[in-house]
Image (cartoon, grey):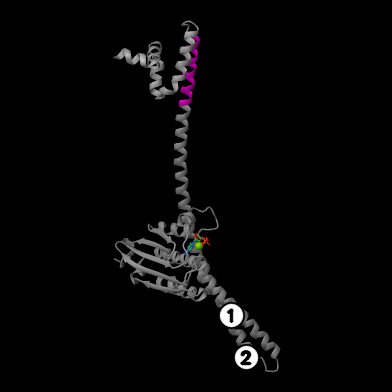
């Protein structure tokens, strides 16, 4: 039986005979687990052996050389694998560092925003308001016989009022004082009201008032997520109706912002290599920074829903 099989498979015969001549060849071949690729060499050396009437020195040299070459190749592969593994580790560490820096940047930015907003509000805006009061007094004291002067003062007053308005808006967009002074729900209400009036969309706000017991950092994140989601709706969605809801779910607070506008491909938008588009990524980063989860769903005919689940913990007493 065995003899028959050998005859039927000449390559097996060759392999057996060369195995007798070179043990190291076989053991190396096995350790490389690459016997198939040795086949042509065996064939080549066998042919040469036949040609030179059994003188195998040259063939063996070539074989040794080939084995060495492959050993080196194997080592290089091994080294590359290690290098690849190290690079992956390094890039993971860098990504973690980058995430840490981004988070530091976000919280530093939030502190600065609060400070600039306060400064604008308490400094520049208050000064302009008192200038306007002085101008009113000056106008009242100006005799009727000086209409040009009176009109001039009125014009300046209008300009000052305009500046007060835009500074107010700027300060509010930076960080609404109402968020620190009155809380998240009044801040969201004010923001939605302004946006609804400017963009002519209906915004319905429903909120679980226990949300105010969340620590400041979490309420700030919720405000920023709502602000970005609403701004996106106003800029991209062409929606007519928007719902903003805050509810309590087991172990967390859930905020949802839904619109009935045009949909978009969320994956593409998140992966898009446009360094200027940071809204969605920023939202996600902020929510994850406080241990939460952000999901965005968008489907044709159904609009978009941005959902932020903010976990509750010991620091949020009063919300459980
Ligand atoms: N509610 C939405 N409806 C329709 N498209 C949206 C909505 N929200 C986001 N998009 C799409 O996703 C893209 C990415 O949004 P993202 O907020 O990241 O960037 P952006 O709004 O273009 O710029 P910015 O960095 O100023 O926020 C938008 O350009 C828009 O095409
Ligand atoms: Mg945006």
What residue is shown at x 64% (from left), y 81% (from top)?
156
Q: Main secondary structure of the magenta part?
A: helix
Could you tell which of marks 2 and 1 lies nearer the N-terminus? Answer: 2
Q: Judge whether residue 181 can be spotted in this image.
A: no
Residue 255 is left or right of residue 161, and the answer is left
Determine whether the residue tagged by mark 1 lies in a helix, strand or loop: helix
179 drawn magenta? no
Q: Looking at the picture, how far across and down is residue 186, in whole percent?
A: 42, 74
* Numbered range of the magenta stretch: 57-74
In the rendered view, tell whether residue 275 sits above or below residue 231.
above
Q: Nearer the viewer, residue 21 or 177?
A: 21
Residue hosting label 1: 161
CA neighbours of label 2 inside 10 A, class few (<14), some (14 to 19), many (20+): few
For the C terminus, the image quarter is bottom left
Residue hosting label 2: 140
**Where residue 197 is drawn, which disc sits there?**
none
């Amino acid at each position: 039986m065995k003899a028959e099989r050998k005859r039927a498979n000449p390559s097996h015969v060759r392999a057996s005979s060369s195995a007798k001549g070179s043990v190291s060849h076989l053991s190396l071949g096995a350790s490389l687990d690459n016997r198939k690729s040795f086949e042509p060499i065996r064939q080549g050396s066998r042919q040469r052996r036949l040609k030179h009437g059994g003188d195998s020195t040259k063939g063996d040299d070539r074989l040794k050389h080939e084995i060495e070459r492959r050993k080196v190749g194997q080592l290089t592969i091994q080294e590359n694998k290690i290098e690849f593994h190290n690079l992956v580790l390094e890039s993971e560490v860098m990504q973690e560092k980058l995430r840490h820096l981004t988070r530091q940047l976000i919280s530093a930015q939030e502190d600065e925003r609060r400070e600039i907003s306060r400064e604008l509000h308490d400094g520049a805006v208050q000064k302009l308001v008192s200038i306007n009061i002085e101008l009113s007094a000056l106008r009242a004291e100006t005799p009727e016989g000086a209409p040009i002067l009176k009109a001039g003062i009125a014009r300046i007053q209008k300009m000052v009022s305009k500046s007060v308005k835009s500074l107010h808006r700027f300060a509010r967009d930076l960080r609404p004082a109402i968020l620190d002074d009155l809380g998240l729900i009044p801040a969201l209400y004010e923001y939605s009201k302004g946006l609804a009036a400017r963009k002519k969309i209906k915004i319905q706000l429903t909120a679980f008032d226990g949300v105010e017991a969340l620590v400041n950092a979490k309420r700030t994140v919720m405000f920023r997520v709502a602000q970005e989601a609403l701004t996106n709706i106003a800029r991209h969605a062409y929606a007519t109706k928007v719902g903003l809801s805050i509810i309590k779910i087991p172990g967390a607070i859930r905020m949802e912002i839904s619109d009935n506008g045009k949909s978009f491909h969320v994956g593409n938008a998140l992966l898009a290599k446009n360094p200027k588009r940071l809204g969605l990524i920023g939202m996600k980063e902020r929510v994850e920074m406080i241990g939460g989860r952000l999901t965005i769903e968008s489907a044709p005919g159904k609009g978009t829903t941005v959902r932020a689940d903010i976990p509750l913990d010991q620091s949020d007493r009063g919300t459980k």
